[in-house]
Amino acid sequence: MGAESSDQPSAKLMSLCPKCGRSPWPFVMILAITAVIAFLTWLILGLSMVEPVQRLGVALVVFLGVGGTLLHYVVGCLKRHCRHGHQSA
């Protein structure tokens, strides 16, 4: 059973403790922060002579980049600071 889960690293990405993964607030905050940063990027690019499609593309890349980075950070913090006493088998 342990060998099966170690063969698939993508399955371990979101394997949080049931008590730690229950709250949606960290993930709502990621979405809110990411949306604000992408919107500000879109607004700032509106001050330059950039095509609307390029503005949207850059804002989308910023949204995905910041969102992925924050998701990676929050999941890592949730795993590291879990104090629910689970034993690793």
Image (spheres, rainbow, N blue to C red):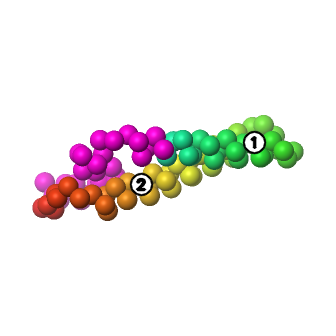
Q: Which residues are magenta?
A: 1-29
Taking the image as shown, residue 39 lies to the left or right of residue 47, namely left
Q: Which mark is residue 78?
A: none
- The three-letter amino acid code for the residue at tag 2 is Val
Which x, y percent locates residue 62? 63, 49
Circle 1: element type: helix
- Residue located at (14% from left, 61% from top): 87
Q: Are marks 1 and 2 in contact (CB under 8 Å)?
A: no
Which x, y percent locates residue 33? 56, 46
- The three-letter amino acid code for the residue at tag 1 is Leu
The reply to whether the magenta stretch includes residue 54 is no
Q: Quadrant of residue 56?
A: top right
- Residue located at (24% from left, 46% from top): 19
Asked whether 19 or 64 is in front, the reply is 19
Q: Is residue 11 visible?
A: no
Q: Is residue 8 visible?
A: yes
Asked whether 37 or 4 is in front, the reply is 37
Asked if residue 11 is positioned above or below residue 6 in the image, the reply reads above
Marks 1 and 2, the one that precedes in the sequence: 1
Q: Residue furthest right?
A: 49
Which x, y percent locates residue 26? 42, 46
Task: Provide the residue designation for mark 1.
Answer: 43
Q: CA distance from mark 1 to mark 2?
A: 27 Å
Task: Provide the residue designation for mark 2.
Answer: 74
